[in-house]
């Protein structure tokens, strides 16, 4: 951190720029900003949202990831949560974890039943698998998929079991500084995405919490994260048609006023291009970075076009939802990724949000 | 009573809250005193349905009796479903003299000419409006009474409100309506909403539109320093000003409950700091939808509270002024301010 000392008189952003040049590994660059500032403030490295990130590239992860897993991830809307690092979690012991989880779920479900119903014994079956290829940086622990299958109560014995709950524990491009700073016994899979019955979700959470001594919390998407997603998705339009950029705002009038603002894909892409600095166009270059400033000025342009017509300032409200053909994200932490090519980009951002949200 | 009539009756009873059902049955006035006494409204719905079906069978009711019951319900509860507005244009010389009987006959015969197997029921409501219930069938099937279209029209007024109409049947209905009201054409009025009373009030301007010219400014407290007083006075003036302008744009008191307004915009992107976009020839295309449980109330509040700058832009004040909630916005000339234009339909 000697460079930081040398640049105390500079603004934080300057020190960021200085530090960026000094390192070579590209995926670490996005965390530069927090390092310069955070180390001076004595904070852990993961505590700030990055101010610039790499432009999304379409990753052809279909070749690496089991298509069945990918289809599951892509076709559904997921609820987001953060998880603190798991204590003594071993990727090699997933089978036995799954057995324990099944037993736990069945036991909890039987609570309050006067007579043991033998059918329930086989009612729930949990499975845990490593999702091969769902990681980006070398430091990322492998993604774990948890699924719970169940048989309907009045089904015939030969009926197939139905998938009733699924959840992912993942870490994509997690802050390497932070991951390295963890003691040896901890595995950091900070992002928990899940869907299924509410009571199953809480059962799984409480089992993971007890077994690995960690805790869960809801992951809401901040205004900045939603704006990032809007910009990142728009940036993909050249490669993959986004159909529209739709933003949903709520203004605090009485009664509340909802504003749906949907922009033509080509026009919004040109607007995005016009607020990009420098590197726009020379796509081949390594410097395809997106800066928070660009995102902010993109949003400001959209808002001012709106203001010019309606004399209503959208900044007075909250951005509730952004959506394109590539996916949709809501303020309350629900997300849908519709295009498998941009799974990594989206999960990188969400991993970062989860790390930020974690109480350390 | 045939099977389809029984099904319709069952559905009506199932979907109507018991309180409402009681009042409606009384209004319907088809059950004998003994039958009415035997119906216990504290019973669960399925028992109620059984009893009413039995009573109707006993009286040998037909489909027309049951549709009558449905019409009473719909007329009493007009704020359900989605209502679309159409506007009659180019009246013929005798348009003003069309009376209910003439309209009724004309409409039925026109519609039957255009479509076979339609069942039409027309009822005049106390508030001068004519209510029409249409059950559609086709050459091979009998009218489907489970999916009727409702039309509300006040004779001699240019507006017609329609709910539950498929796009396939729309031209037929509009044609029959145009002919039977002695008009030459009909067009989409670009106004729709969940509350029939609200959109009718908006079009007929039947809501409180008193535009006050003065607002009492709040009294300042005495024990404050002079500079504070001045600041407060200025604030109070600005606030009173905003309230006045909000009232001027949207009116006072309770406003008709509209649920949304849609703007399809193709206007130039203008931003002095963004040369590339400002110099672009093509317009910036977007669709903006405002929605609220009471849109006009929300917009008025935005203007009064300062969320929206005053004076209110014509784009928003056009909703009550023109009685529309669908607009297409284009620049009328290069470089000129945008204005609301006729929508392209």
Image (cartoon, rainbow, N blue to C red):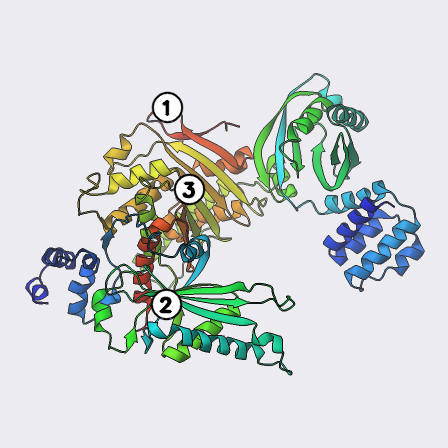
Image x and y of residue B256, in percent: 59, 44
At horizontal 32% and vertical 70% (from top left) the residue drawn is A358
Task: Evaluate whether residue A270 shows in this view.
Answer: yes
Q: Which residue is mark 1?
A: B333
Q: Which residue is mark 3?
A: A262
The tag on residue A82 is 2
A238 above or below A323?
A: above
Q: SS of the residue at dot 2?
A: strand
Q: Nearer the viewer, mark 3 or mark 2?
A: 2
* Marks 1 and 2 close (CB-CB < 8 Å): no
Q: SS of the residue at dot 3?
A: strand
Q: Could you tell me how far apart the alpha carbons at marks 3 and 2 are, in whole angstroms?
A: 30 Å
**Chain ID of residue with mark 1:** B
Task: Evaluate whether residue B307 shows in this view.
Answer: no
Q: Nearer the viewer, mark 1 or mark 2?
A: 2
Same subunit, labels 1 and 2: the answer reads: no
B342 above or below B6?
A: above
């Amino acid at each position: 951190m000697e460079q930081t000392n040398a640049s105390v008189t500079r603004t934080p952003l300057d020190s960021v720029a200085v530090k960026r040049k000094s390192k070579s590994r590209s995926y670490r660059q996005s965390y530069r900003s927090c390092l310069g500032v955070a180390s001076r403030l004595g904070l852990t490295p993961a505590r700030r949202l990055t101010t610039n990130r790499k432009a999304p590239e379409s990753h052809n992860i279909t070749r690496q990831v089991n298509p069945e897993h990918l289809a599951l991830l892509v076709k559904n809307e997921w609820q987001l949560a953060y998880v603190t690092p798991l204590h003594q979690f071993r990727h090699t012991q997933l089978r036995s974890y799954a057995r324990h989880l099944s037993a736990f779920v069945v036991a909890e479900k039987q609570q309050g039943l006067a007579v043991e119903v033998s059918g329930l014994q086989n009612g729930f079956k949990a499975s845990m698998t490593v999702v091969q290829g769902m990681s980006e940086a070398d430091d990322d622990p492998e993604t774990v998929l948890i699924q719970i299958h169940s048989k309907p109560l009045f089904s015939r014995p030969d009926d197939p079991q139905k998938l009733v709950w699924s959840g992912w524990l993942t870490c994509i491009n997690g802050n390497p500084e932070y991951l390295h700073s963890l003691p040896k016994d901890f595995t950091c899979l900070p992002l928990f995405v899940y869907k299924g019955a509410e009571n199953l979700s809480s059962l799984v959470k409480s089992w993971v919490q007890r077994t690995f001594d960690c805790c869960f919390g809801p992951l809401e998407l901040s205004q900045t994260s939603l704006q990032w997603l809007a910009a990142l998705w728009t940036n993909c339009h050249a490669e993959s048609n986004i159909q529209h950029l739709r933003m949903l705002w709520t203004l605090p009038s009485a009664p509340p006023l909802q504003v749906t603002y949907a922009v033509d894909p080509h026009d919004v892409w040109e607007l995005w291009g016009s607020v990009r600095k420098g590197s726009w166009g020379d796509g081949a270059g390594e410097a395809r970075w997106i800066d928070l400033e660009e995102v902010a000025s993109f949003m400001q342009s959209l808002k001012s076009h709106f203001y010019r017509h309606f004399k209503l300032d959208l900044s007075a409200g909250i951005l509730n939802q952004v959506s394109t053909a590539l996916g949709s994200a809501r303020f309350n932490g629900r997300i849908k990724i519709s295009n498998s090519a941009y799974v990594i980009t989206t999960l990188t951002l969400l991993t970062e949000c989860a790390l930020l949200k974690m109480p350390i | 009573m045939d099977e389809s009539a029984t099904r319709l009756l069952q559905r009506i009873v199932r979907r109507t809250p018991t309180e409402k059902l009681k009042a409606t049955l009384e209004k319907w006035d088809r059950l004998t005193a003994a039958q009415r006494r035997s119906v216990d409204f504290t019973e669960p719905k399925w028992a109620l349905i059984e009893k009413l079906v039995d009573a109707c069978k006993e009286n040998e009711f037909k489909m027309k009796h049951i549709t009558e019951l449905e019409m009473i319900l719909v007329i009493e509860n007009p704020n359900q479903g989605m209502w679309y507005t159409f506007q009659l244009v180019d009246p013929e010389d005798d348009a003003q003299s069309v009376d209910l009987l003439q309209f009724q006959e004309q409409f039925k015969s026109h519609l039957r000419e255009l479509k076979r197997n339609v069942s039409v029921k027309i009822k005049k409501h106390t508030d001068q409006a004519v209510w029409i219930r249409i059950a559609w069938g086709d050459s091979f099937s009998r009218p489907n009474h489970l999916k009727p279209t409702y039309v509300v029209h006040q004779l001699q007024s240019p507006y017609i409100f329609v709910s539950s109409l498929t796009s396939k049947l729309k031209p037929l209905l509009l044609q029959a309506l145009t002919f039977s009201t002695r008009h030459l054409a009909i067009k989409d009025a670009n106004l729709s909403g969940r509350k029939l009373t609200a959109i009718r009030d908006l079009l007929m301007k039947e809501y409180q539109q008193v535009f006050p010219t003065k607002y009492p400014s709040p009294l300042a407290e005495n024990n404050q320093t002079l500079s504070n007083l001045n600041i407060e006075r200025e604030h109070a003036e600005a606030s009173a000003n905003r309230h006045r302008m909000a009232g001027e744009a949207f009116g006072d008191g309770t406003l008709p409950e509209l649920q949304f307004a849609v703007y399809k915009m193709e206007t130039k992107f203008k931003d002095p700091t963004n040369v590339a976009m400002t110099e672009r020839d093509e317009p910036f295309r977007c669709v903006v939808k405002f929605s609220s449980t009471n849109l006009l109330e929300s917009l008025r509040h935005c203007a009064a509270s300062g969320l929206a700058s005053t004076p209110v832009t014509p784009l928003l004040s056009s909703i009550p002024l023109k009685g529309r909630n669908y607009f297409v916005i284009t620049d009328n000339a290069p470089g000129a301010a945008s204005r609301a234009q006729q929508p392209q339909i």
